[in-house]
Amino acid sequence: MTRNTWLSIGAVIIVLAVGVGLSQFASSQPDGLEYIAQEQGFAQTADNHALEDAPLAGYGENLEGSSATATAVSALVGIVATAGLGFVVFRIARKKPDQHSTA
């Protein structure tokens, strides 16, 4: 394998380790939108959404096991999904050589 391949593999491992590791320190307090809704008194008007019972809804609260495991799995899925989407977008956007060029 080339040096770039090893660097890429190392970067992926570091990103996964940092993302999953730091996710354990995420706050359990409500986010800004939830906080303002509670402060302004309209939080009780919120409806449940169609995917509330999905495994990763609520940062993985529906997963079996500990909340630390659920948070780590959610972080892992988020990292992989974001990286995969970025890979696809950049692959599509990559400049392709002009096939009709006579240079």
Image (tube, rainbow, N blue to C red):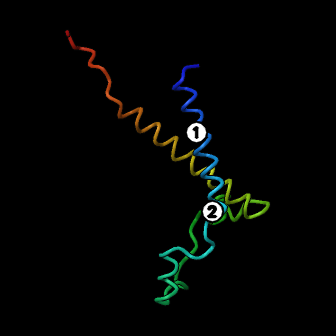
Percent across and percent down for residue 103 are 20, 10
Quarter of the image where one finds residue 14: top right
Residue position marked by numbered label 1 in the rendering? 12
Choose mark 1 or mark 2, whichever is in front: 1
The type of residue carrying mark 2 is: Tyr
Quarter of the image where one finds residue 92: top left
Residue position marked by numbered label 2 in the rendering? 59
Within 10 angstroms of label 1, few (less than 14), some, or many (20 or more) residues? some
Percent across and percent down for residue 84 are 52, 40
> Vertical placement of 64 versus 45: above or below?
above
Q: Residue at x 59, y 35 (%)?
A: 10
Percent across and percent down for residue 51 are 60, 62
Q: Nearer the viewer, residue 94 or 12?
A: 12
Q: Nearer the viewer, residue 19 or 48?
A: 19
Q: Secondary structure at mark 1?
A: helix
Q: Residue furthest top?
A: 102
Q: Residue at x 53, y 73 (%)?
A: 31
Q: CA distance from mark 1 to mark 2?
A: 22 Å
Within 10 angstroms of label 2, few (less than 14), some, or many (20 or more) residues? some
> Vertical placement of 76 versus 9: above or below?
below
Residue 74 image label? none
The type of residue carrying mark 1 is: Val
Q: Position of 96 compared to 24: left or right?
A: left
Q: Position of 98 compared to 67: left or right?
A: left
Q: Residue at x 62, y 54 (%)?
A: 75
Q: Position of 94 compared to 28: left or right?
A: left
Q: Secondary structure at mark 2?
A: helix
Percent across and percent down for residue 25 are 64, 64
